Amino acid sequence: MIGWQCPVCQAPLDSTENTWRCDANHAFDRAKEGYTNLLLANQKRRPDPGDNREMLLARRAFLEGGGYRPLVDALDRRLNNFDAAGRLLDVGCGEGYYLQQLLASRVHWRAAGVDISREALRLAGRRGLSNATFAVASSKRLPLLDHQFDAVLNIFAPLDAAEARRLLTADGQLIQVSPGPAHLQALREFIYDQLRPHSAPAAPEGFTLIARDSVAFNIAYQSSDQLRQLLAMTPFAYKLTEAQQTEFIAQSNTLAADFVISIYQPALGAALDVH
Ligand SMILES: C[S@@+](CC[C@H](N)C(=O)[O-])C[C@H]1O[C@@H](n2cnc3c(N)ncnc32)[C@H](O)[C@@H]1O
Ligand SMILES: [Zn+2]
């Protein structure tokens, strides 16, 4: 079982029923789609924070079409280094594609997915994963009990290093995916006059880098639709007019994906911090 925490008083939540409750009787209903909202109104700056439905549906269609399959395979190989059973947290899990893929062969694992977008969790919850629970929460304050996760996954989403340290076991690993130097290069060249030089990702505070994988490949898109989905799921879509997007799609026959997977461990002593 994943240990969830009451966002009001930080006590453990009993999450076995449809209403999650702490001893002080703070209660949170599980939505019919299968996620629980643990984001308090005073933790939001906007009424609907995070990715919107249009971006999420575009991402889902692109990912389900296998657009980033080599990245899933590389993450899968990394998780093979763990025991046959463990606990995994995906911070900024979006619509749940990576958790579903990674849990498919890991029936003895238990997982939690959190994202600040309620729409993302609606989609993730509806996947009906038997060994994952989903909650709306901010990466800045994750409503989960301390030091329970063997792995924290963080793919192109905000992360709070102190929270990741608080949640990992002492020998747990943070698996962080960030863009590599050639990621969507042709698209970025189409948008910007000059590309900023790429710098290697910095270790989050209190973590030590133990390994780094580079995953670079040409996206095998089947149709212009898939390229349109890719544009719609990235912030680049907002930089291009409809006509520019059509022009880019017409002239592209290949596009590079380039990811860096960084594996970090809590620096010595850091995992035992008390907050
Ligand atoms: C680029 S998407 C990546 C989603 C997913 N990891 C994937 O690769 O498909 C970034 C995600 O971070 C979420 N997000 C943004 N700010 C957040 C925050 N403060 N806490 C938790 N999630 C956040 C967004 O709602 C969005 O789903
Ligand atoms: Zn409480």
Image: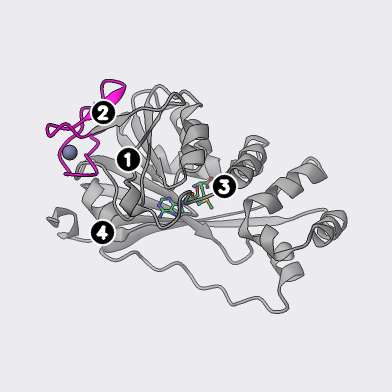
Between residues 206 and 244, which one lies in front from this camera angle? 244
Amino acid type of the residue tagged 4 in the rendering: Ala
Q: Residues within 10 Å of mark 1 (few under 14, many from 20)?
A: many
> Which quarter of the frame holds ligand 2?
top left
Residue labelled with disc 4: 162
Look at the picture and state if 262 lies above or below 8. Answer: below
Q: Quadrant of the C terminus?
A: bottom left
Q: Earlier in the sequence, mark 3 or mark 2?
A: 2
Q: Are marks 1 and 2 in contact (CB under 8 Å)?
A: yes
Q: Residues within 10 Å of mark 4 (few under 14, many from 20)?
A: some
Whether the residue under disc 2 has CB within 8 Å of ligand 2: no
Considering the numbered disc 3 on the image, is that residue within a helix, a strand or a loop?
A: loop
Q: Which residues are magenta?
A: 1-26
Residue labelled with disc 2: 20
Q: Residues within 10 Å of mark 3 (few under 14, many from 20)?
A: some
Residues under labels 3 and 2: Cα distance?
Answer: 26 Å
Residue labelled with disc 1: 38
Amino acid type of the residue tagged 1 in the rendering: Leu
Disc number placed over residue 52 in the picture, else none: 3
Considering the numbered disc 2 on the image, is that residue within a helix, a strand or a loop?
A: strand
